[in-house]
Amino acid sequence: MLSAAEQVSRSVHSLGAGLPSRDARLAYRSGKVGVTAGVAPGYVQGNLAVVPEKLAASFHRFCQLNPKPCPIIGMSEVGDPRIPALGIDLDIRTDIPRYRVWRDGQLSEEPTDIMAHWRDDLVAFVIGCSFSFEEALIADGLKIRHIEEKRNVPMYRTNVPCASAGPFAGPMVVSMRPFKPAEAIRAIQITTRFPAVHGAPVHIDKPELIGIKDIAKPDYGDAVSIQPDEMPVFWACGVTPQSVILQSRPAFAITHAPGFMLVTDVRNSEFSIQ
Amino acid sequence: MLSAAEQVSRSVHSLGAGLPSRDARLAYRSGKVGVTAGVAPGYVQGNLAVVPEKLAASFHRFCQLNPKPCPIIGMSEVGDPRIPALGIDLDIRTDIPRYRVWRDGQLSEEPTDIMAHWRDDLVAFVIGCSFSFEEALIADGLKIRHIEEKRNVPMYRTNVPCASAGPFAGPMVVSMRPFKPAEAIRAIQITTRFPAVHGAPVHIDKPELIGIKDIAKPDYGDAVSIQPDEMPVFWACGVTPQSVILQSRPAFAITHAPGFMLVTDVRNSEFSIQ
C-alpha cells in the first residue's frame, strides 16, 4: 500500500497529459476494448479486485499477510472510484477495457465499464502484475517463453496455503517461466528488485514439491515448452487474490477480465528498489 | 582490487590492537599452526597466491577477466610483504599458519612461514573466500551442509573455461552447497550482495550441464548428502586460480595450504554491497 506522501509524489508524474498510459485509459474510458499486453510499455499494469466495505478489511488483511501473491499497489477510499496514486485522473469504473462482475461467486457479466455497478460501499484494490518484472527481464536480455510462443503465461494452483483472513483462504497460484540455470539465477536477482510486483520467485524446479502434478497442464493460461537444459521458475501470481475471492463466494465482487488490466501512470522503474 | 582510498579507510579499522583477526595473525606469526575455519568470526579470510613479477601481470589480468572465481581482495607491491588494505601490520610471509611452496608446478615444501622463500620480485595476491558469504547465509538461518556434516566443502572441476591470460588458462572450479528450492532462492539473494567473495552462484541443479559427471565424487573436498527435495547450488571457487597457476607449471609459486587461510582485519559486512 502506498503512503499518502507516495501517492502525492506519484501523482505529480501523472499530471502531464500525453502519457501513453493515460492515453490508453482515456481510450478505454471512451469505449475502446482490447487486451493490455504491450500497451504503454514502461508503465505499471495492475490486477483489479473490488469488494464491498464489509469484506474490504478482511481482504486488505489477506493481502497484507500474503504480500508475494497480493502486492497492493493502489487502493480506493470507500465508495471513491479514484486512485490518484496510480493516475491523477484515474477512474476505476471506466478505465479498464473489460471487467467481470461476480454474484455469489458466479460470473454474471463482462461489461466494458462498471458505472451501473458502482456503489458507495465498494472498495477497489489494485494488485501488482508480473508484466512489470517481465519488462525488466526482457530489458536484461532474457527471453520470456510464453511471450516468444505468443501464449498466456502458464499458471498453477499449488499446495502452498496462503495465510487466511476472514472468509479469504486458499492456495497460492504461481506463474511459471522456464530458464536455463544461469538465466534463472539472473531472473531471481532482477525480480528481487521488484517486491511490489511479486518480487523474487517462490520456487524453482521440482514442481511436485509445491503440488504441481503435470507441468504441461497449467490450471490457468497456456502450457509452454521447457527444454531439457531449462528449469521451471515459479513466481507468486496475482491470480491468487482473485481465485481466493471467488472461492469465498462473496455476494458481490468485481474484477478485471483476464488480460484486460488497469494501465497506470506509475513507471515500472519506480517499483525497483535499486 | 581495493583502491588506495579504500586501503587507507580499511586500514583505519585495523589500527586498534585486540582485533580477533589481528590476534590470530600474531599467533600464527609466532608459530601457532592450525586450520582457520571458525577463527575470528566476522572477519574476511582469503586465499593466497604468490608469483614472480614476470608472471604477476598475466595473473592479475587472469583475475580481472574471471572475477567470480578470482575476486582479488588484496595485492602487494612487488617485493613488499605487506598488504595494508587487509591489515595495517599484516605480513604475508608469516601470518598464514601453513604455506605451500611450488617449484615447476610441483609441491616442494609446506612451511609455516616463507621468510626464507620471500624474494624482491614476488607479488602476493589475496583472493576472496566463500567463508564470508557462508557466514551471511548462516546468519540468515540457512544451514550449510558440509559444516553440519563437519566436512570440507565439495568442489568440482567444470567444463566451463575461464578466460585465459598469458600462461594462465583452465576450467572454473566450483563449490557446491545443497539447498531446498526456496532456500536456494534466498542463498542467491544473499550471496549476490557479496561480489568480492564470489557473489551469486554460477549454476544451480543439473550438474551435468557444467560437466560434473558424478556429484558424489567431488574433485576437491568431501562429498556431502543431498536430499531428494534439495538441489545442488554451485558457486565459483577460489581454488580456481590456484589450480590454474599449478597447471601453468610456474618455476616458482607460493600458496596457502588448503584450510590454512589468511585472516584479515576486513569485516565480512564490509564486502556486502547492500
Image (cartoon, coloured by chain):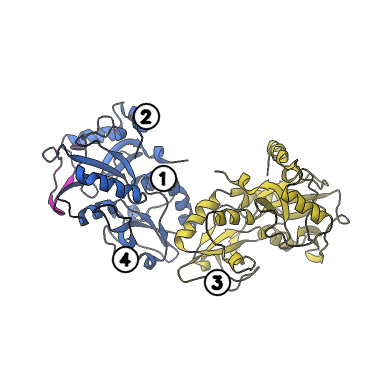
Chain colours: A yellow, B blue
Residue tagged 4: B216
In terms of depth relative to the viewer, which is nearer, B184 or A32? Answer: A32
* Residues flagged by tags 2 and 3 on a common chain: no
- For marks 2 and 1, the one nearer the N-term is 2
The picture places residue B188, in percent across and down from the top left corner, at: 45, 52
Q: Is residue B172 above or below residue A271?
A: below
Chain of the residue that carries numbered disc 2 in the rendered image: B
Tag 2–tag 1 contact (CB < 8 Å) = no
Q: Quadrant of the N terminus of chain A?
A: top right
Residue tagged 2: B9
Tag 1–tag 4 contact (CB < 8 Å) = no
In terms of depth relative to the viewer, which is nearer, B192 or B267? Answer: B192
- For marks 2 and 4, the one nearer the N-term is 2
Chain of the residue that carries numbered disc 1 in the rendered image: B
Chain of the residue that carries numbered disc 4 in the rendered image: B
Crowding around mark 2 (Cα neighbors within 10 Å: few <14, some 14 to 19, many 20+) is few
Helix, strand or loop at disc 2? helix
The picture places residue B19, in percent across and down from the top left corner, at: 31, 31
Q: Quadrant of the C terminus of chain A?
A: top right
The picture places residue A84, in percent across and down from the top left corner, at: 76, 43
Residue tagged 3: A225
Q: Is residue B5 above or below residue B237?
A: above
Residue B98: quarter of image: top left
Residue tagged 1: B194
Helix, strand or loop at disc 3? loop
Query: What is the chief secondary structure element of the magenta stretch?
Result: loop
Front position among marks 1 and 4: 1
* Residues flagged by tags 4 and 3 on a common chain: no
Crowding around mark 3 (Cα neighbors within 10 Å: few <14, some 14 to 19, many 20+) is few
**In this orientation, does residue B154 appear?**
no
